[in-house]
Image (cartoon, rainbow, N blue to C red):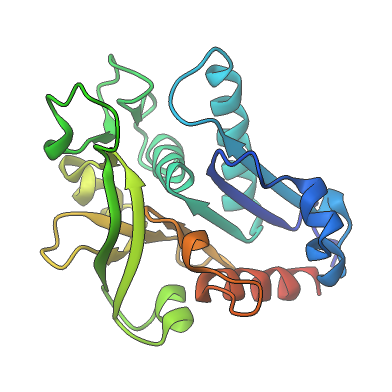
Amino acid sequence: MERTRPIIALLYDYDKTLCTQDMQNYGFIPSLGMAPEDFWRLANAFGWHEKMDGILAYMYTMIVQCREKGVPFLGICLGMQMAVVEFARHVCGMADAHSSEFSRTTAHPVIDLMACQRGITDKGGTMRLGAYPCRLTGRESWAFAAYGTQEISERHRHRYEFNNDFREAVAGAGLVLAGLSPDGQLVEMVELPGHPWFVGVQFHPELKSRPNRAHPLFREFIAAARRYKG
């Protein structure tokens, strides 16, 4: 069966040190038996800027293609948030769903500023930073298959989160909340069941990944790309 190109998608926060050319030079793409056009990545510059509307539009197009055509997808931090926005818009019927980081007028802010961040004006080192525990909600998930345990710890860097006011609607439409904070209040991971591999995480697995010891999510993400490529 002919596969849709690209065959792998990574959506994450902006990191100027990581680009497709870097991955080509360091052997990442060739090692998978892929060409650069097989790899669909988008790094978003942190926060709002003058190109944000175009970047967000491209994000939505990318996520729709991955969700509908079965392209393996890993959304990191903002990547997870935009996957939730796309799901809310196109599956839950919330046409104006958005993150309140980018829209103050949406009636469906499925991603919103964390309660502990409200009122903070000093932006220097005041995000939710560092390692926090997370509990996987079940054993029948890609997350559990990757980690092999329900108790994990990951590093974070964010101010916005999944808005619990929409948890019932989004989960009821089929998006699995695969990982939560120990108190159950923060959504840390989402998955799309019935898809070859579609995972979004609020944390940053790249901060714990090493060239000789890949993070479990990256390992499984690449494995899914290999399967999809066939």
Q: Is residue 21 above or below residue 181?
A: above
Which of the image's four quarters has the C terminus? Answer: bottom right
* Outermost residue toward the front in this view: 124
The percent coordinates of residue 76 (x first, y second) are 48, 51
The percent coordinates of residue 104 (x first, y second) are 28, 16
* Outermost residue toward the bottom in this view: 148
Write the residue at 85% across / 49% down: 37
Write the residue at 59% across / 75% down: 214
Is 35 left or right of 83, judged from the image as shown? Answer: right
Q: Nearer the viewer, residue 62 or 170?
A: 62
Write the residue at 24% across / 37% down: 126
Is 177 left or right of 18, judged from the image as shown? Answer: left
Write the residue at 42% across / 81% down: 147
Q: Is residue 25 above or below residue 54?
A: below
Which of the image's four quarters has the N terminus? Answer: bottom right
Is 137 left or right of 183, judged from the image as shown? Answer: right
Q: Nearer the viewer, residue 51 or 88?
A: 51
**How many numbered marks does the figure carry?**
0
The percent coordinates of residue 216 (x first, y second) are 51, 76
Is 189 left or right of 207, judged from the image as shown? Answer: left
The percent coordinates of residue 18 (x first, y second) are 67, 47
